[in-house]
Image (cartoon, rainbow, N blue to C red):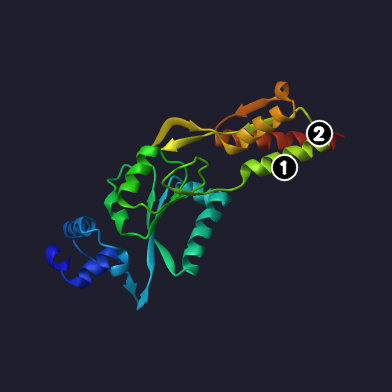
């Protein structure tokens, strides 16, 4: 491979290992990646650093840096992925944040042991990733896929558990405030909505408990949802003080 690229083996190794301390021209780097993809070169052949072989992972995320910083839910997902990778002697070597207007070289994903996907991507985009790497694990997506593994929380079951508790205490007029997720493309959000698992669980539970007429759905954006919850919290606190 080094001969085909016209560079040394060390150069190939450091480019594919994404050594940030190594400087090389963009043309040379692109040529090495193209040849690696054409030869279906596996990262395990070159992922030796400090005499310790590590399996590299790629992360494709529909969560922006700002969302991750401001939302503990996404912070914990990223922390868990990083910690577990370290425990297995692995690391996340490449991160792709969506949406982006940058020209993403998707073929680079072919050299990683697996691709971790956080968020809900369009099926077309998932298929593009699958072309270059068949080891895909999706986190925080409740859709069913034939070719991809999915890891998600038990939001549906926990929603029904909470509704059971409310029902046991005599509540029947129960509303749901939530937000749907839009599928992510490479350059932005699509118009396609994915219904939240908690909303599905709420509607199903209300029907099973013969409360169909009491169903009240308030589906807003996630930012609006937080505002509504804050307003309700303020209202309840003020009413409690008055009592």
Nearer to us in this view, 112 or 146? 146
> In this orientation, which residue lies closer to the viewer: 164 or 189?
164
- Residue 19 marker: none
Q: Residues within 10 Å of mark 1 (few under 14, many from 20)?
A: some
Q: Mark 1 or mark 2: name the one nearer the start of the chain.
A: 1
Marks 1 and 2: which is nearer the front? 1
What residue appears at the point 37 percent right and 63 percent down from the top-left corner?
A: 56
Q: Position of residue 113 (x, y in %)?
A: 37, 60
Q: Is residue 186 visible?
A: no
Which residue is drawn at the image coordinates 38% and 43% (left, top)? 126
Q: Nearer the viewer, residue 105 or 109?
A: 109
Quadrant hosting residue 54: bottom left
Mark 2 crowd level (few <14, some 14–19, many ≥20, 10 Å Cα): few
Residue at x-position 83% and y-position 33%: 170
Q: Secondary structure at mark 2?
A: helix
x and y percent of residue 105 in the render? Answer: 27, 50
Q: Is residue 115 visible?
A: yes
Q: Are marks 1 and 2 in contact (CB under 8 Å)?
A: no
Q: Residue furthest bottom?
A: 51
Q: Residue at x 27, y 51 (%)?
A: 107
Position of residue 41 relative to residue 188, above or below, is below
- CA–CA distance between discs 1 and 2? 28 Å
Q: Is 57 on the left-hand or right-hand side of 229? A: left
Question: Residue 161 — which label?
Answer: 1
Residue 221 position, x and y percent, is 55, 33
Q: Which residue is mark 2?
A: 239
Q: Can you tell which quarter of the image residue 235 is in?
A: top right
Q: Is residue 93 left or right of residue 81?
A: left
Residue 10, position as x, y percentages in the image: 22, 72
């Amino acid at each position: 491979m080094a001969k085909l690229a016209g560079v040394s083996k060390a150069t190939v190794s450091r480019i594919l290992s994404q050594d940030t301390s190594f400087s090389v021209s963009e043309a040379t780097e692109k040529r090495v990646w193209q040849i690696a993809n054409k030869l279906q070169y596996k990262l395990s052949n070159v992922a030796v650093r400090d005499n310790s072989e590590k399996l590299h992972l790629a992360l494709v995320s529909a969560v922006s840096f700002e969302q991750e910083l401001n939302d503990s839910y996404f912070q914990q997902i990223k922390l868990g992925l990083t910690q577990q990778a370290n425990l297995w002697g692995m690391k996340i070597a490449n991160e792709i944040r969506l949406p982006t207007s940058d020209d993403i070289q998707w073929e680079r994903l072919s050299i990683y042991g697996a691709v971790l996907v956080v968020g809900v991507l369009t099926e077309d985009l998932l298929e593009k990733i699958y072309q270059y790497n068949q080891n895909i694990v999706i986190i925080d997506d409740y859709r069913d896929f034939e070719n991809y593994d999915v890891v998600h929380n038990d939001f549906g079951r926990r929603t029904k558990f909470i509704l059971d508790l409310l029902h046991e205490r005599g509540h029947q007029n129960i509303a749901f405030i939530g937000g749907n997720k839009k599928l992510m493309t490479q350059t932005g959000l699509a118009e396609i909505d994915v219904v939240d698992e908690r909303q599905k669980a709420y509607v199903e539970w209300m029907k099973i408990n013969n409360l169909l007429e009491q169903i009240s759905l308030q589906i807003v954006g996630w930012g609006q949802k937080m505002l509504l919850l804050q307003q309700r919290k303020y209202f309840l606190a003020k009413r409690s003080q008055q009592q």
